[in-house]
Image: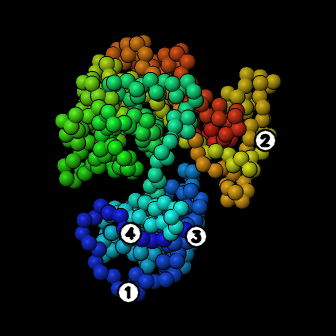
Amino acid sequence: MPTEGAMGGGATARTPPSVSAPQLDDAPAVRLLADTLRQAAQRNASDLHIEPMEHGWRVRLRIDGVLHELARPAAHLRDAFVTRIKVLARMDIAERRIPQDGRLRLAASTTSQAAEDYRVNSLPTLHGEKLVLRRLEALPADLSLAELGLDEAQQRTVADAIGAPHGLVLVTGPTGSGKTLSLYCFLQRLNGMARNLCSVEDPAEIQLAGINQVNVREKAGLTFAVALRALLRQDPDIIMIGEIRDEETASVAVKAAQTGHLVLSTVHTNDASAACARLIDIGVAPYNLAGSLRLVTAQRLVRRLCPQCRVRGDVPQAVLIAAGLGAQESDITQPYVARGCDACHGIGYRGRVGIHEVLPISEAIRDLIVAGRGAHEIAREARRNGVATLREAALARVSDGTTSLAEALAATEAS
C-alpha cells in the first residue's frame, strides 16, 4: 500500500501555514486517508470526490467513468481529513473561500510499487470545501494503437497521418473520452532522437521523457497562443496542443501545420465531421483548414464487461435489429450483459476501451470544406468512403463480447 511521503509541487506558491501537532498527527484521519487511497487504487478509480453535505460528508470514487459511493465517514473527521490532504498538496489550509489547486505524491511502500501522483482541486460549496483528487497514472511504455481500441484498418490510417512530415491531426470527443491519452500515445510513437517534440497543455497530466512540455498559465499571460508562438521559434518538428478552444490558437495551429510542422490537438465536438465546422465557426478560413487538415478521429470510452461474470442476455430480437446488430433474426446472436461478482465489486464491468470514428481527409472532403459545406454533407461523404460511425464501432464491441448493448447505446446516444 502506498504511504504518504514526499510532497509534489502545487499550484499555490506560498508555503502553507504551520499546523499544530494534533492536526497533523490525527491518527484516525491519517488512517482514513490511507485506507481511502488504498481502496481507490485497488478499484482503479480515476477520481476521488470528498463532498461536504448538510449533515455529514461522503467519499465517492469514479470507476470507469461512473461515480460510486465508497463511504460516509464520521462527521468529526472531515476537517482533519481535508486538512491532511491540503497539507500534503501544499495548499493553503487557512484559505477556504476560493478554489485552490495542488499536487501530491504518495511514495511507494515497497520497491515493487510505483509512487502515485494526484492532482488536487478544492472548491468552496454551501456546506464546506469539496475536494477532488485526480489520479495521474504513468503512460505505459509500450502503449499501442491497438490498445487504444482502434481496429487494424483504423490503425493503418492513423499511423499514416501521424507519420506525415506536416499537417493537422485532430482528436475530438467530450470531456473524459480519452482524447489526451490518444495524443500521448501518438507522441510516444513519434518520440525519437531525430525529432524535436513539444507540447502545450493545461496542465500536463503525464510527463513524457524526451518531450518538451509547457503548462499554460493564463493568469501570467502564458496562453495557448503565446506558448505556441514561442514554440515555433524553438525549431519544433511535432507540436501537441492540449485543446484548440479559440480563434487565435486555431490560427497559429493551422499556420504551423501549413509551414512544415505536424500538429496534434483536440477539439470538443460529437463526431469527426463536426470538427471541421467547429474550426470554421471559431474563425479558421475554410481554404486554410482544407489545406492543412489530414485526419480527424472521434472517440468515446465504453466499459468492458467483467470476463468472469458476463452472461448471455435475453434481448428481444426487435431491439437488436433496431440497434443495428442484424438485418434479420438469423444474423443475430444474443449479446452479453453485466451481472456482477467479487472480481468487479458487483459492478459487472472492469476497465474501459475506446471506440473510434477515423476520418481521413480525402480530396472530396477537402472540396466540401472549401465550399463551406456543413457537417452532414461531410459525414455523408465519409460514409460513402466506408468510414464507420461511432455507433457502428460500439456495436462491433458488442458483437465480440467486449461490452453490453446498453453500454454501447448509452455511449453513442448523441452520435
Distance from Cα at disc 4 to Cα at disc 2: 48 Å
Kindly state the secondary structure of the residue where label 3 is placed. Answer: strand
Would you name the residue on which mark 1 appears?
A: 21
Q: Earlier in the sequence, mark 1 or mark 2?
A: 1
Asked if 94 appears above or below 325 in the picture, the reply is below
Task: Identify the residue at image location x=39%, y=34%.
Answer: 190
Residue ID for mark 4: 6
The residue type indicated by label 1 comes to: Ala
In x, y percent, where is residue 164?
37, 24
Q: Secondary structure at mark 2?
A: strand
Mark closer to the chain start, 4 or 1: 4
Whether 118 is drawn above or below 200: the answer is: below
Pointer 1 or 3: first along the chain: 1
Q: Residue at x 32, y 33 (%)?
A: 194
The kind of residue on which mark 3 rests is: Ala
Q: Residue at x 49, y 60 (%)?
A: 114
Q: Name the residue tied to disc 3.
A: 71
| Residue 216 image point, x, y percent | 27, 48
State how far apart marks 1 and 2 are (Cα): 57 Å
- Comes first in the chain, label 3 or label 4: 4
Quadrant for residue 395, please give it: top right
Asked whether disc 3 touches disc 4, contact meaning CB atoms under 8 Å apart, the reply is no
| Amino acid type for the residue under numbered disc 4 | Ala
**Which mark, by number, is residue 174?**
none
Local SS, label 1: helix
Residue ID at (53%, 15%): 384
